[in-house]
Image (cartoon, helix red, strand yellow):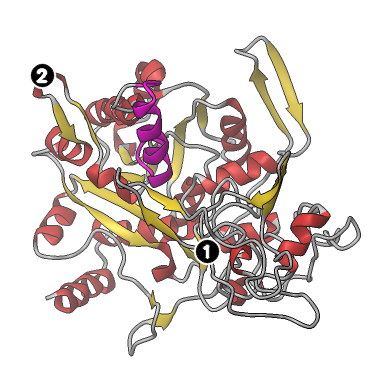
Amino acid sequence: MRKLAVSLFSGAGIGDTGFRAAGFDFISMCELEPERAALAKLNFPSSRVFASGVEETHAEIVAHAKQYPAGDELFLLTCTAPCQGMSKSGQGTLRKNIRAGHRPALDPRNRLILPALDVIHELRPLWAVFENVIEMRNTMIEDGDRGLRHILDIVFDRLSPEYDGQAFDVEMADYGIPQRRQRLITVMTRDPGAREAFRSGSPLVPLATHAKVATRTLKKWVSVMDAIGDFTPLDGRNDHSASDPKIPFHRVPILDPKKYEWIRHTAPGRSAFDSQCIQPGCGFQGNRTHGASHNEDGINRAHRDTPLYCQRCQALLPRPYTETEKGIRLMSGYTSAYKRMDADLPAPALTRNLSYPCSDQKLHPTQNRVLSLAEAMKIHSLDRYDFKWGPLEFEAGGGRRKKKMEIAPDSLIRLVIGESVPPFFLELLGKHILTFTDPTPEKRQHRRFVQRTLW
């Protein structure tokens, strides 16, 4: 029997690529942004891609899924509702705008999960998987006459009593992915065997295979250098050193000379804000480093008194600075800005800003540059799959004109990587789900082993 699936808030389909590798057949996908929807259509050519919002396309999605024969019931529905109003960075921006009176206290984007629940109610998939940031646990929205409620409480209430499930805090590095990316994975099922197994203690997500420190049963995390150490070295100084044309997408932005010097003197695992004196005859290594602390409003602020000049010889330190009419001053920035990744750890979570050295821990562990897109794809586990980046064709300007691209621009590639979950984890999750629904003797034995391990 085909394992039919529907994807809501699909993005470019990167996460669903993992589910497909596990054996799921996506018959329809829904993505509001035209460029992302075009990538989804390119990579899922047999799927009906609705380039619109879930709320506006609700009836069409349901009608399309219900046209399949009764023997091909909907097996899986995936939902990755927008997280900007839930993430740490999103909440910080939200609080700032609330204080300034620019927007209401509740982010309306957080309510987009509600029409997805309506679709689930009508289609009754055997399994539903929600993926979002960890902060979703503490996010509240208005629930009609019931007032403010936590999103997860609404999900569990609206899907019960037909579904059982749980929200799991998942660290992607625990599954051999060379990236420290934490996500909230909520798995709900109405499959009778799965519900019985879950109530008996079997988790609905796969067991971890890796840990920060290796144990008898777990391997050590895969470090960023384990993943990208074999790539051709690059340097952000000039055109010649910043790319390798033999490797697709292995290129980095060229740094202006000032930034290049800051980065060149940045020590492994440290920020350029911590760099020490490079003046011949001095070389003082005891200059005070950068820091941060919470102010009276509870907001974490980087210190503004970090020295820019050597505290011994008064020479300018190779730290980020900006020029003003009054001279130069230390650039505003968090302690993680212009910071090198730790070579012995998985990379920090990739974001849409992965090519900007001023963003959070974006510098290569040893080389004077940021990650290349090819390296980012490897760190995100996307290199395991045949994911295409062009050609693209979609409607732009509100549908007033057609737009064509031979290849997705770097900005779009960074965006869809930054907003997606590594597909290899979802492949593992998909295969784990099938162990409940396709109970061969070997899979039943595996579940019993898992249950004994947990107890």
Numbered disc 2: secondary structure: helix
Q: Is residue 284 visible?
A: yes
Measured as percent of width and height from the top left, residue 81 is found at 38, 35
Q: Which residue occupies the extreme right position in the image? A: 240
Gap between marks 2 and 1 measured at Cα: 49 Å
For residue 27, above or below residue 292: above
What numbered label is drawn on residue 145? 2
> Which circle, 2 or 1, is nearer the viewer?
1
Which residue is located at x 27 percent, y 27 percent?
A: 114
Position of 118 with respect to 193 (left or right) is right
Which residue is located at x 30 percent, y 46 percent?
A: 296
Measured as percent of width and height from the top left, residue 216 is found at 33, 90
Measured as percent of width and height from the top left, residue 14 is found at 53, 47
Residue type beneath disc 2: Asp
Question: What is the span of residues highlighted in magenta in the rendered image?
Answer: 83-103
For the residues labelled 2 and 1, say whether their Cβ atoms are less than 8 Å apart.
Answer: no
Magenta-drawn stretch contains 86: yes
Question: The C terminus appears in which quarter of the rendering?
Answer: bottom left
Q: Is residue 80 visible?
A: no
Mark 1, Cα crowd under 10 Å, few <14 / some 14-19 / many 20+, is many
Position of 221 with respect to 379 (left or right) is left
Depth check: give the residue in front, 242 or 132. 242
Residue type beneath disc 1: His
Q: Which residue occupies the extreme top position in the image? A: 400
Mark 2, Cα crowd under 10 Å, few <14 / some 14-19 / many 20+, is few
Position of 44 with respect to 133 (left or right) is right
- Residue underneath mark 1: 290
Numbered disc 1: secondary structure: loop
Depth check: give the residue in front, 221 or 283. 283
Which residue is located at x 71 percent, y 39 percent?
A: 408
Measured as percent of width and height from the top left, residue 231 is found at 73, 70
For residue 280, above or below residue 159: below
